[in-house]
Image (cartoon, rainbow, N blue to C red):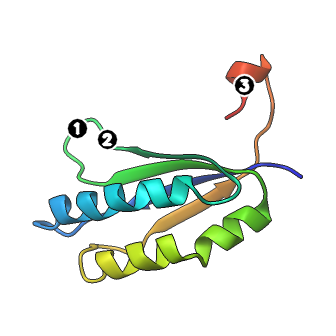
Amino acid sequence: MSAVIVVATVSPKPGEEQAVREAILAAIPKVHAEPGCGKYALHEPTGDSTDLVFVEKWESQEALETHSGGPALKELGGALKGKLAAPLDVRTFTAIPAGTAEQGTL
């Protein structure tokens, strides 16, 4: 099985930035406890954007699918309802190993 990398961008509505951040931060420990979660890391951009970006690593497509339908994400979806300026932008990838094993893949 090949690991699945996810890059997901969350765009809060103006004025909802703190509520979105708090909802996401509350969900992270629950997601970290899910089977197959290798990485679920939140990032904020440098500069003026209020978007938040997840970089995720799941041990398999099945683990990602379980996460996608799991209780932590359903709860987070409810907490974010009406607070986002756009739908989540979720993209999945598989690694192309290059260079050293440590530096060339997530």
In the image, residue 56 above or below residue 96:
below
Judge from the rendering whether residue 35 lies leftward or rightward of residue 72; answer left or right: right
For marks 2 and 3 on the same chain, the one whose residue lies earlier in the sequence: 2
**Closer-to-camera residue (24/97):** 24
Q: From this viewpoint, is residue 61 visible?
A: yes
SS for dot 1 = loop
Q: Residue at x 58, y 75 (%)?
A: 70
Task: Return the x and y of residue 41 as percentages of the image width and height.
Answer: 47, 44
Residue under label 2:
45
In the image, residue 21 above or below residue 41:
below
Residue under label 1:
47
Q: From this viewpoint, is residue 99 visible?
A: no
Q: Are marks 2 and 1 in contact (CB under 8 Å)?
A: yes
What amino acid type is highlighted by mark number 3?
A: Gly
Question: Which residue is the extreme one toward the top?
Answer: 100
**Closer-to-camera residue (48/15):** 15
Residue under label 3:
104
Residue 99 position by quadrant? top right
Q: Are marks 1 and 3 in contact (CB under 8 Å)?
A: no
- Work out how far the residue at label 1 is from the one at label 3, CA to CA, in angstroms: 27 Å
Residue 75 position by quadrant? bottom left
Task: Return the x and y of residue 63 as percentages of the image width and height.
Answer: 73, 63
Q: Residues within 10 Å of mark 2 (few under 14, many from 20)?
A: few
Q: Residue at x 33, y 55 (%)?
A: 25
Which disc is residue 38 wearing? none
What amino acid type is highlighted by mark number 1?
A: Gly
In the image, residue 36 above or below residue 42:
below
Q: Residues within 10 Å of mark 3 (few under 14, many from 20)?
A: few
Task: Return the x and y of residue 30 as percentages of the image width and height.
Answer: 48, 60
Q: Residues within 10 Å of mark 1 (few under 14, many from 20)?
A: few
Q: Residue at x 68, y 72 (%)?
A: 66
